[in-house]
Image: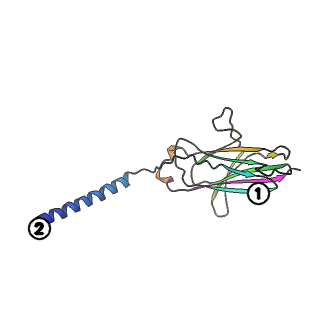
């Protein structure tokens, strides 16, 4: 191979590498914060209240991204499981606590679905407070529910989380939201 052909080949390789680098930079500059998922991410967790108890579960909403469709999470609370039923009448308080990293809105339905005729969110309070470390949390509560030992019962909950598509900006990229569900049950007196 002659020297001129080697130079031409070297220039061609350098030109192709430069083109690849420029295209890569162009794609990064013009890219938009967006990701896709095919799941509704149903949690389907069951809490069994068989005695006075305090139960807690945390959800890491790392895969949430802005979209027009709501995210649906389901869980149930009952006074029976396969083998046991509570031996006393119980009341329980349900509290949802979230970080405020993302502009999310929440609805909670008991024994009904979002969109069902007459469906009304059962969230009674929705307060934002700051803890001792300066972190803001949203705390949402429902009214107290009763479970009677002579009537085995399970309440089905549907949590609807909205993250509107108009928040599809890089400002919300790689931000994680945490959701904590707390159930505090007590014996009815």
The span from disc 2 to disc 1 (Cα, nearest Å) is: 81 Å
Q: Is residue 97 visible?
A: yes
Residue 135, position in %: x, y? 63, 60
Whether the magenta-drawn stretch holds residue 173 is answered as yes
Which residue is at the front of the view, 117 or 66? 117
158 with respect to 172 (left or right): right
Using a 10 Å C-alpha cutoff, classify the residue at mark 2 as few (fewer than 14 neighbours), some (14 to 19) or many (20 or more).
Answer: few
116 with respect to 29 (left or right): right
Q: Which residue is mark 1?
A: 54
In the picture as drawn, the residue positioned furthest to the top comes out as 117
27 with respect to 54 (left or right): left
Q: Which residue is mark 2?
A: 3
Whether the magenta-drawn stretch holds residue 134 is answered as no
In the picture as drawn, the residue positioned furthest to the front comes out as 83
Residue 14, position in %: x, y? 23, 62
- What residue is drawn where x is 54% and y is 50%? 64
Q: Nearer the viewer, mark 2 or mark 1?
A: 2
168 with respect to 43 (left or right): left
Q: Which segment is the magenta one?
A: 172-189
- Circle 2 SS class: helix
Using a 10 Å C-alpha cutoff, classify the residue at mark 1 as few (fewer than 14 neighbours), some (14 to 19) or many (20 or more).
Answer: few
- What residue is drawn where x is 72% and y is 54%? 182
Q: Is residue 25 above or below residue 110?
A: below
| Residue 133: quadrant of the picture | bottom right
Residue 161, position in %: x, y? 60, 46
């Amino acid at each position: 191979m002659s020297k001129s052909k080697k130079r031409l080949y070297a220039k061609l390789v350098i030109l192709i590498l430069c083109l690849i680098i420029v295209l890569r930079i162009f794609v990064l500059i013009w890219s938009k914060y967006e990701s896709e998922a095919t799941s509704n991410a149903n949690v389907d967790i069951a809490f069994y209240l068989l005695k006075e108890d305090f139960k807690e579960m945390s959800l890491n909403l790392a895969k949430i991204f802005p979209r027009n469709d709501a995210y649906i999470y389901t869980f149930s609370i009952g006074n029976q499981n396969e083998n046991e039923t509570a031996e006393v009448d119980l009341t329980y308080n349900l509290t949802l606590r979230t970080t405020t990293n993302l502009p999310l809105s929440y609805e909670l339905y008991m024994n009904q679905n979002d969109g069902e005729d007459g469906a009304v969110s059962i969230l009674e309070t929705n307060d934002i407070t700051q803890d001792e470390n300066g972190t803001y949390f949203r705390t949402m509560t429902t009214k107290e529910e009763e479970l009677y030992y002579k009537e085995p019962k399970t309440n089905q909950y549907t949590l609807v989380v909205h993250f509107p598509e108009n928040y599809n900006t890089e400002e919300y990229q790689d931000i994680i939201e945490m959701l904590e569900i707390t159930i505090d049950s007590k014996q009815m007196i």
